[in-house]
Image (cartoon, grey):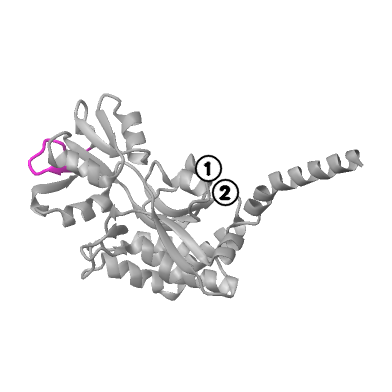
């Protein structure tokens, strides 16, 4: 009898220890179905992709893509209505947030890289840009070729910081937790330039109290394809996200949202080139 009880106790202990693993293995779609909520990690200070506006509303292009393309696709797949919960994510925190199941999807300004693909999976590309510099008007910095010995701000964990470290090791790289902190350092003269993706610098400049006091310097010194990140090896969830983006590109909704934020009357005019438009369309595979 004692032996039987010992066996039953061992089985119970084993069951309790593996239940979380089975729960995780059930996948993100099951998690969303059970909770009724898609938890999205995104930015609070990266206009016009994701930021808190003057009305204290959390808005942006990346958020619209989730709310108007991904959410309806998930609801159709799950056969039920779901809510969206947003949590702040930054370059240092976004992968840990995914890995810990704190969020289900990162939708902000995250560049799809081969190194990051070791830790997370990415959707297809929804925006293309490249790294540049934001400097005070009259600055001698004209691009990456003129930053040797200069104090350069970047965000922690960003591809821009890595590239500066590799290409210009004698630049004085100073990393900050987010874009507002880096820009504040630039405003206060603690650094000579702030590097980030050109489109984000354009958004930052447009929202600055005196936009004409700032200049975006240099040609692109990197290729930055933005994708939505999710946990690795969850092909069912990734398939829904990708299908949602492809449907949006195919039916024109993606381009409507792009025009809302980046068109002539948008938050930040940034016309899509013919080459980028073709690239977006060619990501759509046949049904």
Quadrant position of the N terminus in the picture: top right
Count of numbered labels shown in the rendering = 2
* Labelled disc at residue 119: 1
Contact, mark 2 vs mark 1 (Cβ under 8 Å): yes
Q: Nearer the viewer, residue 33 or 61?
A: 33
How far from the left and from the top, in percent, is residue 265?
21, 70
How far from the left and from the top, in percent, is residue 271?
26, 63
Farthest-out residue, right: 1
Q: Is 71 left or right of 78, judged from the image as shown?
A: left
x 37%, y 67%: residue: 64
Quadrant in which residue 23 is drawn: bottom right
Q: Check residue 140 for magenta coloring.
A: yes
- What is the distance, in whole Å, between disc 2 and disc 1 at their CAs? 7 Å
In this picture, is 77 found above or below 144?
below
Tag 1's secondary structure?
loop
> Dot 1 surroundings within 10 Å: few (below 14), some, or many (20 or more)?
some
In this picture, is 252 found above or below 273?
below
x 29%, y 53%: residue: 46
Q: Check residue 263 for magenta coloring.
A: no
| Mark nearer the N terminus (2 vs 1) | 1
Bounds of the magenta segment: 134-143
* Labelled disc at residue 232: 2
Farthest-out residue, front: 1
Q: Is 27 left or right of 37, judged from the image as shown?
A: right
How far from the left and from the top, in percent, is residue 47?
27, 57
Q: Is residue 276 visible?
A: yes
* Labelled disc at residue 12: none
Q: Is residue 218 visible?
A: no
């Amino acid at each position: 009898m004692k032996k039987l009880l010992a066996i039953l106790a061992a089985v119970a202990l084993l069951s309790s220890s593996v239940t979380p693993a089975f729960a995780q293995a059930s996948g993100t779609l099951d998690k969303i179905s059970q909770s009724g909520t898609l938890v999205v990690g995104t930015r609070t200070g990266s206009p016009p992709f994701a930021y808190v506006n003057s009305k204290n509303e959390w808005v942006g292009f990346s958020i619209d893509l989730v709310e108007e393309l991904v959410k309806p696709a998930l609801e159709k797949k799950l056969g039920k209505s779901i809510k969206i919960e947003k949590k702040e994510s930054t370059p240092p925190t976004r992968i840990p947030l995914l890995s810990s199941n704190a969020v289900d999807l990162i939708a902000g300004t995250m560049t799809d890289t081969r190194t990051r693909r070791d830790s997370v999976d990415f959707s297809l590309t929804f925006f293309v840009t490249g790294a540049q510099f934001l400097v005070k008007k009259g600055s001698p910095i004209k691009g990456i070729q003129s930053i040797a010995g200069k104090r350069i701000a970047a965000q922690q964990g960003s591809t821009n910081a890595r590239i500066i470290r590799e290409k210009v090791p004698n630049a004085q790289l100073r990393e900050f937790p987010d874009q507002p902190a880096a820009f504040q350092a630039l405003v206060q003269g603690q650094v000579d330039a702030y590097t980030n993706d050109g489109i984000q610098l354009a958004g930052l400049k447009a929202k600055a109290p005196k936009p004409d006091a700032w200049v975006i310097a240099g040609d692109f010194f990197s290729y930055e394809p933005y994708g939505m990140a999710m946990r690795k090896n969850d092909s069912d969830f990734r398939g829904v996200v990708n299908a949602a983006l492809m449907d949006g590109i195919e039916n024109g909704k993606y381009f409507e949202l792009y025009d809302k934020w980046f068109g002539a009357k948008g938050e930040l005019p940034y016309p899509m080139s013919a080459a980028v438009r073709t690239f977006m369309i060619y990501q759509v595979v046949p049904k």
